[in-house]
Image: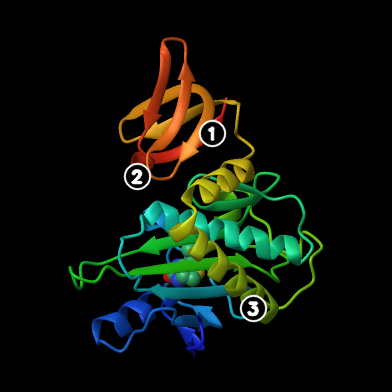
Amino acid sequence: MFERRFQHGTTDSTNERAFTALADGSARHGDVHLAEAQTAGRGRLGRTWISAAGEGLYLSVVLLPAPPPLRPAALTVAAALAVRDALIELGLEHSTLKWPNDLEVLGKKLVGILVETRGLDRDRPHYVVGIGVNVRQRSFPSELVEERPVTSLALEGVDVGTEEVTERLLAQLAQRLDQARDDLDRLSGDFLDATCLAGREVRVRSGRSEHRGRLVGLDLAAGLELEQPDGRRRVPVETVEGVTAL
Ligand code: BTN
């Protein structure tokens, strides 16, 4: 897996490069699109992912999984865990995953993951898993810092280049994608552990609703399980927009 690598130099967005290849029929499962810089890097909820040259890792992977279908939530979680595994290998010990796809160090954002799909071929589901890692930044543009606290591997004392992060990350991603297919329970459990929220009182945002309770379980096929005064409630994973400790 991940044999085909496309290095784009400066490009609009590696996710967009992956979708262009999907649209013209040249994409294959496991294709990796990399950029030195992005001029229109995108994040979740229509946000911009600031992508200065050589400072971060900007990577997108094309997935054309064979049936049975994989849930997008499982892909997001697999990617998040893979990044965390890779960063632990590189010496970053204390990071937390924040639902659904942020990786933080003491509340500061280090990684962003954007899983996208477009209805290009109904018979063959496809996904583009875009991952941005702050690697070498020593400072960030003020508009970003004003939005939320951010950090980089360099600022956390991990002195590595983007190539090394790429290799570790892809090796871990291959394993976590296998797990998403073969052992969703374990993937769910590992994710819950990595959020550090198991057993804690949490607030879950789900569409227009908000649920509070003790987080007692996560099953990526079924939902988040909350213990509430009147019993247990399951919140379907695909509807969950955020989970925060109370
Ligand atoms: C987020 O946290 O909002 C997700 C950010 C995802 C950024 C990555 S960088 C590589 C890939 N290409 C993009 O345009 N976005 C993703």
Q: Residue 58's mark?
A: none
- What residue is pinned by disc 3? 167
Q: Which amino acid does label 1 sit on?
A: Thr
Q: Does the residue labelled 1 lie within 8 Å of ligand 1?
A: no
Residue 116 position in % (x across, y down): 35, 63
Q: Which residue is drawn at 77% across and 59% down?
A: 156
Q: Residue at x 53, y 51 (%)?
A: 187
Residue 97 position in % (x across, y down): 59, 48
Mark 2–mark 1 Cα distance, whole angstroms, equals 17 Å
Residue 213 position in % (x across, y down): 49, 21
Q: Is mark 3 within 8 Å of ligand 1?
A: no
Residue 185 position in % (x across, y down): 50, 46
Mark 2–mark 3 Cα distance, whole angstroms, equals 30 Å
Q: Which of marks 3 and 1 is in front?
A: 3
- What residue is pinned by disc 2? 238
Q: The residue tagged with tag 1: helix, strand or loop?
A: strand
Q: How many labels does the image show?
A: 3
Q: Which amino acid does label 3 sit on?
A: Glu
Q: The residue tagged with tag 3: helix, strand or loop?
A: helix
To which quarter of the image does residue 25 belong? bottom left
Q: In this view, does 187 lie to the left or right of 68?
A: right
Of the residues under marks 2 and 1, which one precedes in the sequence?
2
Q: Do the residues labelled 2 and 3 touch (CB within 8 Å)?
A: no
Question: How crowded is the residue under tag 3: few (<14 C-alpha within 10 Å), some, or many (20+)?
Answer: few
Question: How crowded is the residue under tag 1: few (<14 C-alpha within 10 Å), some, or many (20+)?
Answer: some
